[in-house]
Image (cartoon, rainbow, N blue to C red):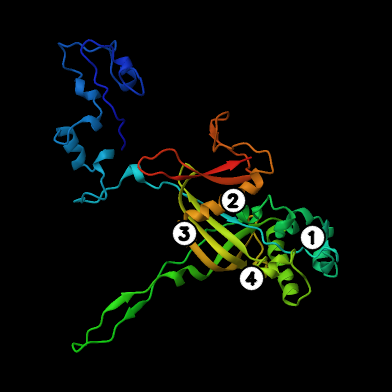
Amino acid sequence: MRYDTGTTAAPNNTNLNSTLDPTNKRLSDLGYEGNGTVDTNQTTIKENLYTSPSTLKNDDALIRTLWSNGIYRKQDFDDFNSFYLFPRNDPFKMVGTAKEYVFFTKPDLHIFGSRRASSMDRLSDITKLNPELKQVPFFNDLYSRGYKDSVLKSLQYSLDASTPFVNILSNYKNSNLDLSNITVNDEETATNIYNTRIYYRKPSDSADEEFEFSMEFKDNKYLDCYLWFKAYDIYERLKYQGKVTPTTYDYALYKALSDQMTVFKIIVGEDNETILYWAQLWGVYPKSVPRSAFSELPTDGLFRFTVDFKSTFQADMEPLSLLHFNNLSDLYRTSHVTTDLDIFDNKSMRVTGESAKIPYIVRSTNSDPHVMYLLKWRK
């Protein structure tokens, strides 16, 4: 239960219609009859009836009665400097209904463009299929059947660096991204004459490395999501066989893994913009193609399948992850004309149903009690 702050006590012989701040309701709206005034000779309506509980002292009978029934004001919660004799649920800090967003960066597979002999690091004919893939029926088929600007284009980051994310994976994910716990090992000393040893805590660096996870995706009748993973797998076969070269030789020079992705996990609160938690995974690549999903046909109109992933590194609540996220978003915002997309549509007075082009993160200007990060969108 929440209470409005500030006093709303009405002086004697004063019209109360203007003192019920902030609602400014008439007494008749609250179940009282009359002209909305209080006579000092009458005691039917007490002045302290309109006094906010936040202004009452702790020894007030009303406050102590509320406490006895498990009802507290905002200032009654002090998690770090007091002990609660009985469990308290703080309604001012409740998480509410949270939502998870997952963003996958594009890999940079050499799907489009050919390399001239005179220019070892510049692609030409970027609208045409890579000549190294023209002899592969799978890629020729996708190219000819209209998957060029959807599935294939989202596999090559260098084709359009201003769109850094694989949007279909974010839109079609059907489960949450599970993360591993931070765990440590122990270091023990030799035993002394009393057969006693001392244990020391080892660092947790290894907990941020080599992590595998699975995610469920839904798919449409064109199998856009499934074919994305299938095309990735076919390309990796060709790469392992040495039949396809990277989009730029800088990848080989600097030993950069152009076929791996970064994944951002962002959890927002019930306002759909206050970031409660974030994590980042580096060196991510899919480990499976879910052919078994077609063993059972869907009855609700959607295919569903699970894909296994491998991550080399992971970290959470690191501010540098948010900076990395915004650097990617700026690639789009600096090359496209966009406007802010508010979560609430003031015209329809409902939550917006529009689609966004790119997300970005800002710091909140509200510091009660902490400064939070906000997930914003541009359209």
- Whole-number angstrom distance, CA of label 4 to CA of label 1: 32 Å
In the image, farthest residue toward the front: 118
Residue 234: quadrant of the picture: bottom right
Mark 2 or mark 3, whichever is nearer to me:
2
- Whole-number angstrom distance, CA of label 3 to CA of label 1: 37 Å
**What numbered label is drawn on residue 122?**
1
Q: Is residue 101 visible?
A: no
Q: Is residue 351 visible?
A: yes
Q: Earlier in the sequence, mark 4 or mark 2?
A: 4
Residue 279 is left or right of residue 221, and the answer is: left
Query: Which residue sits at x=60%, y=39%?
Result: 353
Q: Nearer the viewer, residue 66 or 21?
A: 21
Report helix, strand or loop for mark 2: helix
- Whole-number angstrom distance, CA of label 2 to CA of label 3: 18 Å
User: Which residue matches tag 4?
Assistant: 288
Report helix, strand or loop for mark 4: loop
Report helix, strand or loop for mark 1: loop
Q: Say which amino acid is labelled 2.
A: Asn
Binning the other alpha carbons within 10 Å of mark 2 as few (below 14), some (14 to 19) or many (20 upward) gives few
Q: From the top left corner, tell me how far across and down residue 169 is, in percent.
A: 63, 56
Residue 204 is left or right of residue 75, and the answer is: right
User: Which residue matches tag 3?
Assistant: 316
User: Which residue matches tag 2?
Assistant: 327
- Tag 4 and tag 2, C-beta contact below 8 Å: no
Query: Which residue sits at x=81%, y=55%?
Result: 146
Query: Which residue sits at x=79%, y=74%?
Result: 243
Mark 3 or mark 1, whichever is nearer to me:
1
Q: Nearer the viewer, residue 324 or 94?
A: 324
Residue 107: quadrant of the picture: bottom right
